[in-house]
Structures are given as C-alpha cells and as structure tokens.
Amino acid sequence: MSWHDRARVDSNPVVFFDVTIGGASAGRVTFELFADVAPKTCENFRQMCAGEFRSREGAPRGYKGCAFHRVIKDFMIQGGDFVNGDGTGCASIYGSKFDDEAFVGRHTGAGLLSSANSGPDTNGCQFFVTCAKTEWLDDKHVVFGRVLGDGMLVIRKVENVATGGGNKPKLPCVIAECGEM
C-alpha cells in the first residue's frame, strides 16, 4: 500500500514535533498516525508525544527534549531514544519491547514514520522518518505514520545537518516540544 496516495483518516491521531537545530527553531513536523492499521504502535508513539508515558516513579518520559541521534542523508533520520540518547535505549508503554504489529505499509518514499528496532519484535521508543524510498526495510520495520503538510521541509533540514562518527549530527537536532493536536 502506498501511504502517500491514501486519504487522511479523520479518526487517526495527529501529533507534532517542534524541532530545533543547534538551538534555533527549525519548524514544526506534524504526523498522521495510522491507528487504523497499527493501533498498538501508534498508541505507544502518541503517548510519548503527548507526555502521557510515565516512569515507574511517575515522572513523565517521552520525546520532549529528545535528540535525533542518527541522520543519514537520502535515507532517514532516527530519534526517540530518551533512555540513553544514543540509539541503544528501549522503552515502551507495554514494558521494554513489543512485537511487530502490521507490515501492511511499505516504505514507498520520503516522509514515512516507522519503528526503529534491533530485529523482529523489538519495538520500543525509537523511530525513524524516511527521506527516500527504502523498500529493503519492508517487512522488517512497521510503517505507522506519515508527515503531513510542509513538515517535510523540517525533516530535510535535519537530514542536511553535517554528521560525524556513527552518523551523529554535529549540531544537536532536538524535539524541543511535542504533543497531540
């Protein structure tokens, strides 16, 4: 299924990231979450955007203040590791990790939101946004949302930040604010 051609589903949640690069505002990215196709994955992401996810101690945990720790031009930008900040952390509203939910969506182009994982059934807080067609990821990573409107301009700004070792951006690319619309 091509998510780019599909009409927006009004009942699907819409969330946003306000992104900074090097401390300066880069703009807002708005996502439609495909809850009609991948409800568990979308609810995990939605709660982390909305600040509803809590640690065992009751403190809010989620994407606010979280950096994009891995950026590969013409491929994807990855973030969501609010545990360790470097791509090694994993947490979810379901415990540590949760199972792959639906491989219906295909990585058909730029602007798709997908679960980052370390193998089958290892989904958690990390995600990536595609910057190109990435069909080799099909049936390995769950597509669960897409960028809406001009949010892709912000994704391109992050994509074009110079990187160093481990594809880490040389300027901090941070989700300064996030929430549900």
Image (cartoon, rainbow, N blue to C red):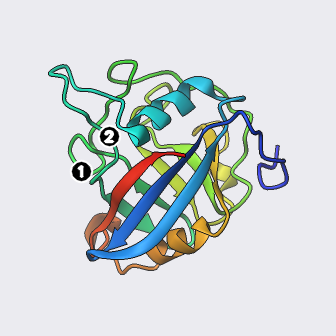
117 to 172, vertically: above or below: above
Q: Residue under label 1, please give it.
A: 85
Q: Quadrant of residue 17?
A: bottom left
- Residue occupying the point 55% across, 65% down: 75
Point out residue 5 in the picture as x, y percentages from the top left corner: 85, 54
Left or right: 114 in relation to 92 = right
The first of marks 1 and 2 along the sequence is 2
- Is 151 positioned to the left or the right of 117 in the image? right
- Quadrant placement of the N terminus: top right
**Foreground pick, 179 / 83:** 179
- Residue tagged 2: 62
The local secondary structure at tag 2 comes to: loop
Q: Nearer the viewer, residue 58 or 113?
A: 58
The residue lying at 31 percent from left, 34 percent from top is: 90
Badge 2: few (under 14), some or many (20 or more) residues near its Cα, within 10 Å? many
User: Looking at numbered disc 1 in the image, what kind of residue is underneath it?
Assistant: Gly
- The span from disc 1 to disc 2 (Cα, nearest Å) is 12 Å
- Which tag is nearer the camera, tag 1 or tag 2? 2
Q: Nearer the viewer, residue 38 or 135?
A: 38
For residue 38, the mark is none
Residue reaching furthest front? 181
Query: Picture quarter containing residue 83?
Result: top left
Q: Residue furthest left?
A: 57
Instruction: Give the x, y percent position of residue 123.
Output: 45, 31
Q: Amino acid at mark 2?
A: Gly
Against 60, residue 99 (above or below) is: above
Q: Residues within 10 Å of mark 1 (few under 14, many from 20)?
A: some
State the residue at coordinates (19%, 23%).
58
Which residue is rendered at x = 42% and y = 75% of the image?
Answer: 26
Q: Does the CB distance between marks 1 and 2 fall below 8 Å? A: no
Per the image, label 1 sits on a secondary structure element best described as loop
Q: Position of residue 177 (x, y in %)?
A: 36, 55
